[in-house]
Image (cartoon, helix red, strand yellow):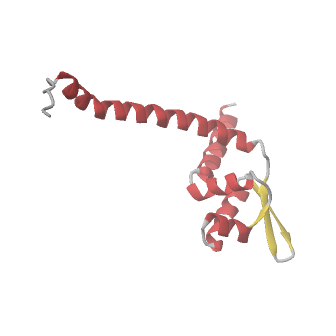
Amino acid sequence: MKENSAILIRELAERFAALADETRLRILIRLKQGECNVRTLSEELGVAQPSVSKHLSVLERNGFVTIRRVGTQSLCRLSDPDLMQICALVCDVVSRQVRTRAKAVIGRNLSPFVSQVSSSKRKPIKE
């Protein structure tokens, strides 16, 4: 049983490593809209076509996308749309964490200012 767990953990680590790239995540988000050729992906993402192809290769090798050849075009799509549910879940968690941190940082940075303003005596405005 431990051997199976070790294999699963290794496989999961490889999959998550494949997702640990901004361009690959952008590709997946774009492919959520539907099948797309490599040239269009390159143009829409503003990334050189050879770079897009390299990232697609990593995503395909890890089971996230399927690439099929039609004539001279390579058409890409998500291999399993359910994979985007994982991305959505992680995005929700990260978004909450970022908001919480931002509130804490803003509150901490404003605290000295707020206490100075509230504790200072106001002088009357001369007209």
Q: Quadrant location of the C terminus? A: top left
Q: Tell me where residue 109 sits by quadrant.
A: top left
Q: Quadrant location of the N terminus? A: top right
Relative image position of residue 14 (x, y in whole percent): 62, 49
The image shows a total of numbered marks equal to 0
Relative image position of residue 102 (x, y in whole percent): 42, 36
- From what the image shows, is residue 69 above or below residue 118? below
Q: Is residue 22 left or right of residue 84?
A: left
Q: Tell me where residue 58 sits by quadrant.
A: bottom right
Nearer to me, 8 or 1: 8
Relative image position of residue 67 (x, y in whole percent): 79, 63
Residue at (36%, 34%) from the top-left corner? 106
Relative image position of residue 89 (x, y in whole percent): 64, 36
Residue at (72%, 71%) from the top-left corner? 39
Residue at (70%, 53%) from the top-left corner? 62
Residue at (68%, 39%) from the top-left corner? 86
Q: Which residue in the rendered view is the most extreme toward the front?
A: 127
Q: Is residue 20 left or right of residue 65?
A: left
Q: Which residue in the rendered view is the most extreme toward the right?
A: 71
Nearer to me, 93 or 102: 102
Q: Tell me where residue 35 sits by quadrant.
A: bottom right
